[in-house]
Image: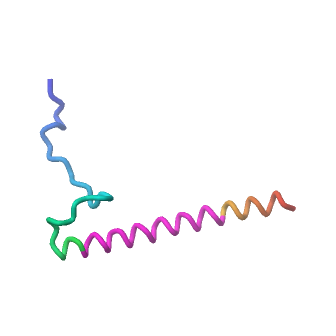
């Protein structure tokens, strides 16, 4: 028996690393660049937050 979700169209990923870009328009490529820039910023913020937590913990244990 087939699952009801099998009939639904699968949502394409916004971007996949290493994906063939030859069939995308300039507008689509520009959109993906903006998406990736915002994702990089989000990741950099997460890294900064984790570093701050790690540094705060390290300063407690050094005392």
Q: Position of residue 59 (x, y in %)?
A: 79, 63
Q: Is residue 21 magenta?
A: no
Q: How is the image coloured?
A: rainbow
Q: Farthest residue to the top: give it.
A: 1
Q: Position of residue 48 (x, y in %)?
A: 58, 68
Residue found at x 12% / y 39%? 7
Which residue is more in the foreground, 61 or 24? 24
Q: Note whether 17 is above or below 29 in the view shown.
A: above
Q: Is residue 44 magenta?
A: yes
Image mark count? 0
Q: Would you identify the image quadrant in which residue 39 lies? A: bottom left
- Which quarter of the rendering shows the N terminus? top left
Residue found at x 22% / y 60%? 20
Q: Position of residue 29 (x, y in %)?
A: 23, 72
- Which quarter of the rendering shows the C terminus? bottom right
Is 46 situated left or right of 4 in this image? Answer: right
Q: Position of residue 51 (x, y in %)?
A: 63, 64
Which residue is more in the foreground, 32 or 60? 32
Instruction: State the extent of the magenta-drawn residues as a range.
Output: 30-52
Q: Note whether 3 is above or below 34 in the view shown.
A: above
Is 60 situated left or right of 26 in this image? Answer: right
Main SS of the magenta part reads helix
Is 63 situated left or right of 4 in this image? Answer: right
Residue found at x 52% / y 68%? 45
Residue found at x 45% / y 67%? 42
């Amino acid at each position: 028996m087939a699952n009801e979700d099998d009939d639904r169209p699968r949502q394409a990923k916004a971007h996949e690393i290493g994906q063939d870009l030859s069939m995308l328009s300039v507008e689509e490529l520009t959109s993906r660049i903006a998406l990736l820039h915002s994702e990089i910023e989000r990741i950099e913020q997460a890294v900064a937050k984790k570093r701050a937590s790690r540094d705060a913990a390290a300063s407690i244990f050094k005392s």
